[in-house]
Amino acid sequence: AQSVTQPDIHITVSEGASLELRCNYSYGATPYLFWYVQSPGQGLQLLLKYFSGDTLVQGIKGFEAEFKRSQSSFNLRKPSVHWSDAAEYFCAGVDSNYQLIWGAGTKLIIKP
Amino acid sequence: GAVVSQHPSWVICKSGTSVKIECRSLDFQATTMFWYRQFPKQSLMLMATSNEGSKATYEQGVEKDKFLINHASLTLSTLTVTSAHPEDSSFYICSAKEDHGSYNEQFFGPGTRLTVL
C-alpha cells in the first residue's frame, strides 16, 4: 500500500540552527509530494510541493525540500530556523485515487 | 487566490444537538471538497470526499448518517454532525480542489474546533 512516513515524532532545534525533517514514501511511480505546516489550532499551509522536474524544490518561508528517488525520501530543510517556525509539519503524498496520504507529522520545537 | 473559508471557526454545543460546518471556496469553483478530522497531536484523517451535485463518498468507518455532507454548489460544502456526542469533539478541516480525475492542489480551510459538552 502507498504510504508516507515521518520517522520523527518531534525534533528540537536551537534558534538559528539548521533543520532537516525526514519524510519517506512508498510508491511505484513518480509521486506528488507536499510539505504542510500547521501552527497550533490553525489550518494547514502549503510550504512546497514536488510534481516533477527539478528535484530540489524551493518553498515559502525559506524552506526547501529535495526529492531523492533512490532513497524514497522528500526531506524538508531550512538553513536557519526562527522561533516562529515552531509548529507541526506534515509530509503528504497523493495516492492512485488522487487523494492525499498524510504522514503522522513532526512537531518542531525551537530552543531559545 | 485559492482561498477556502470555514464557518464557524469554533463551536461549543450540548450533547444530542446537531452542528453544521460550512466550507466555502472564495475565489474558485471547487468540483471536489474533502472533509478531514484531526485529533489532538495526530495527523489528518480523511472522512469523506464530496463532488458537486452528487453524494459524498465516505471513508471506511465513518458513519454517513452521523456526518451528513452536502455539496450543493461549486463553492459550498457543509458537514452536519448529527446528534453530537463528546467523542465527536475534534478539529474538522475541509479542503477543496478544482478538477476531477487528476491531481490538482487541495486548498485547506482554517479548520473548525468542535467541542461537545
Image: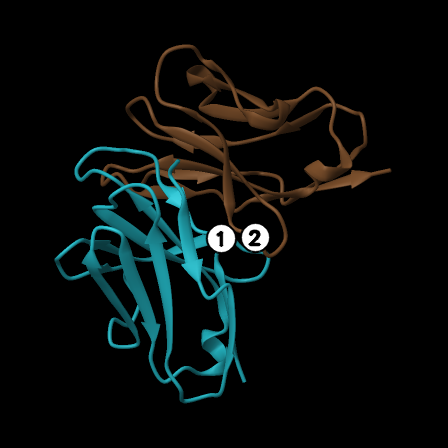
Q: Amino acid at mark 1?
A: Pro
Residue furthest top as drawn: A54
Which chain is disc 2 placed on?
Answer: A
User: What hue represents chain A?
Assistant: brown
Given residues A58 and A92, the one toward you in this image is A58
Asked if B66 appears above or below A84 in the picture, the reply is below
Q: Position of residue B30 (x, y in %)?
A: 25, 46
Q: Which residue is mark 2?
A: A42
In the rendered image, the residue lying farthest to the left is B54
Q: Chain of mark 1?
A: B
**Residue located 46% across and 66% down the image:** B8
Label 1 residue SS: loop
Q: What SS does tag 2 mark?
A: loop
Q: Amino acid at mark 2?
A: Gln
Tell me the colour chain B is drawn in: cyan
**Mark drawn on residue B110:** 1
Left or right: residue B99 versus residue B41 is left
Residue shown at 34% from the left, 35% from the top: B105
Co-location on one chain, circles 1 and 2: no
What is the quadrant of residue B49 in the picture?
bottom left
Query: Which quadrant is the N terminus of chain A positioned in?
Result: top left
* B90 on left or right of B67: right
Left or right: residue A110 versus residue A74 is: right
- Dots 1, 2 in contact, CB < 8 A: yes
Which residue is situated farthest in the right direction here? A112
